[in-house]
Image (cartoon, rainbow, N blue to C red):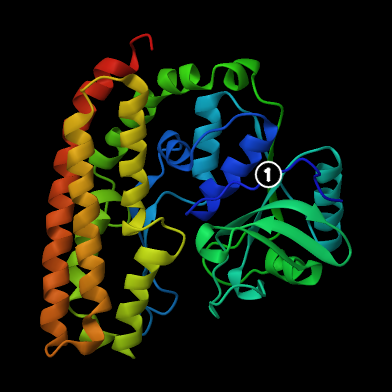
Amino acid sequence: MRLATFQPQLGEHCETTTLRNMIHHAGAGISEPMLFGLGQGIDFQYWDAPDPGSGVPMLTGRIEPALVSRNACSALGVELRASQAPDPETAFAAAVELLDAGHVVGVSVDIFHLDYFSSRSHFAAHYLALYGLDDSLAHVVDTGQQGGAQTLPAESLRRARASSEGFMPSPHLQLYVERLPERLVTDTDAVLREQIWNAVRLTAERMTAERGPRFGIGALRRAASEIAGWSDTLAPADEVVQGVGRFWRFAGTGGANFRKLYHAFLEEARQLFGDSELDPFVEDFGDVQRQWDQAIDMLMAYRGADDGRGQLEAVAARLDAIADAEQAHFEGLLVPAVKRAGEPA
């Protein structure tokens, strides 16, 4: 079964690429940054390593997997259906049934088992848009970095969906959207204008709240306080430090640990509203994006540094500065967001 009218939509982050493809096929063209912003996707989260004595924590710049999709669909009035099959055979049959009904199917996978993926690490919080499947082949859309539309052996997809290894596995999870509200299809921009400020408000409230050492600005400061010691505590430090830099730049983040996507969302929101109230925040978050890129550059240069600990101390200082900037910018953004969220679009 393969959707005959499906047109792949490219993206940079796996989950919002998948959601974009599901919603586009259902009838509404919405950009990836807009979905990320409406999904309140930006965050910083600190997940302890399975073996704290030798492993690096998972440091990610977004909210939990699948929550971006749920938030965005709730904002847009779209019913997002999720289910988790008990075994590979049931998962296969359920996906074929949804495809036969005309739906693009979002599936969670472990990248280790995707034959076109260069990474040899287990990471199970990756998403694909599935638009064709039979006994031998699967047709999916991945991120632009991974080549966009891909065809792979059905057995490769089966193993990837069944995996319980890696970060936040959800074996056999699948998502799809029901028929879109008519107004979202016929007057998409108006619906977006009605929802943007509320999504901004909810994001700013969360990002300015005190949520302990694992989430938000507190987690970012925790990472900054620990990162200088990685040269002494992690082995091999060269590989681990560069691996974090690569993850923040390339691993489905759209660059700058998701800050690039949020900056693009604010730019698109400014264009949709056609006013200047968002101008300073677009500039502010552009600066945040640049600071993240600088921190990543420093991590990537760690291997060749004369003073590895000094290099990581510089990264820590940059992350502290980023934390200060994000705290201030979200506090500033919250003021107009509270006012505008209740106004007619």
Question: Dot 1, how many residues are within 10 Å of its Cα: few (below 14), some (14-19), or many (20+)?
Answer: few
Residue under the image location 14 percent in, 40 percent down: 328
Nearest to the observer: residue 308 or residue 184: 184
* Element type at mark 1: loop
Above or below residue 344? Residue 80 is below
Image spot of residue 221 (x, y percent): 19, 59
Residue 321 quadrant = bottom left
Nearest to the observer: residue 172 or residue 288: 288
Residue under the image location 39 percent in, 68 percent down: 247
Image spot of residue 84 (x, y percent): 72, 51
Relative to residue 246, is residue 179 drawn left or right?
right
Residue 209 in sight from this viewpoint = no
Relative to residue 92, is residue 47 drawn left or right?
left
Q: Mark 1 points at which residue?
A: 7
Q: Residue furthest top?
A: 344
Quadrant showing the C terminus:
top left
Residue 20 quadrant = top right
Relative to residue 13, is residue 183 drawn left or right?
right
Residue 250 quadrant = bottom left
Image spot of residue 102 (x, y percent): 80, 38
Residue under the image location 19 percent in, 24 percent down: 335
Image spot of residue 58 (x, y percent): 39, 67
Three-letter amino acid code of the residue under disc 1? Gln
Nearest to the observer: residue 3 or residue 319: 3
